[in-house]
Amino acid sequence: MEEIRVSPDYNWFRSTVPLKRIIVDDDDSKVWSLYDAGPKSIRCPIIFLPPLQYPVYWDLLEFCDGFRKLLDHLQLDKVHLFGASLGGFLAQKFAEVTHKSPRVHSLILCNSFSDTSIFNQTWTANSFWLMPAFMLKKIVLGNFAKGPVDPKMADAIDFMVDRLESLNQSELASRLTLNCQNSYVEPHKIKDVAVTIMDVFDQSALSHEAKEEMYKLYPNARRAHLKTDCVRILPIR
């Protein structure tokens, strides 16, 4: 984690890009936090999920409604969405929910999934709100690599553990609920959205079968392979 914290790029970003906190609901506890970078003249920017931090939502439709209000507040008609893991699933669901009045121009999905049943936790999803924080953290930490890992991966795991510690019980429980409640993407509703699927070659919580399902869901998607610190884009298949 120390290597990431002393990275010139990381420190430059944190010191120069402001963190904005935005309330879009009548409930003052619903605070969205985002780093606002890039020229304001771009009317169709890219939004990353994460580091966009969203408030506590226990239902996917509720999240999508809150995110729509955030885009309205920012006066953005359409956006590109980059989503990693749960962020990618939420991005797909938002594109699906808004398909009659499209708000998503394209999706970039990194280590994401299309069906929450792959985690075999749908039967416990409605009980996460009852669990203490230490138990929820144990569930998440169980997906991290065990045993010896290379130094860069060890730094990344330490960084993620540090981020995990910054979440309170309700924030963590709500994210696990969204991740595991019974839901799947309906691809026919987002067939007009350009999709790029990004794969990584290190260990992840997703099975090979889950990744193959994403390829089947988006047969015309572009594929990107993240090998080290660069991305190789493969042509549309």
Image: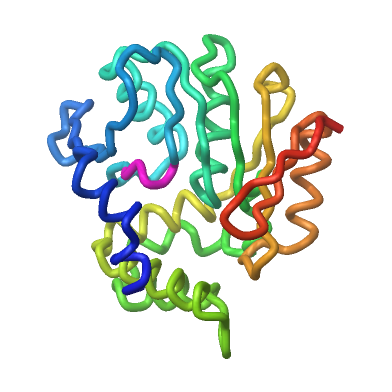
Q: Is residue 190 magenta?
A: no
Examine the rendered structure and indicate whether residue 126 appears above or below residue 187. Answer: below
Residue 202 or residue 50, whichever sits in front: 202
In this rendering, the count of numbered labels is 0
Residue 228 on image: x %, y %: 61, 60
Residue 150 on image: x %, y %: 56, 80
| Identity of the residue drawn at 37% across and 53% down | 174
| Identity of the residue drawn at 50% across and 73% down | 152
Q: Residue furthest left?
A: 28
Residue 97 on image: x %, y %: 54, 24
Residue 93 or residue 80, whichever sits in front: 80
Quarter of the figure that contains the N terminus: bottom left
Span shown in magenta: 49-53
Examine the rendered structure and indicate whether residue 194 appears above or below residue 62. Answer: above
The answer to which quarter of the image holds residue 221 is: top right
Q: Residue furthest front?
A: 8
Q: Residue furthest bottom?
A: 147
| Identity of the residue drawn at 22% across and 26% down | 24
| Identity of the residue drawn at 37% across and 77% down | 135
SS majority, magenta: loop
Residue 200 on image: x %, y %: 66, 57
Left or right for 109, reference 166: right
The answer to which quarter of the image holds residue 236 is: top right
Left or right for 2, reference 212: left
Left or right for 3, reference 206: left
Examine the rendered structure and indicate whether residue 199 appears above or below residue 169. Answer: above
Quarter of the figure that contains the C terminus: top right
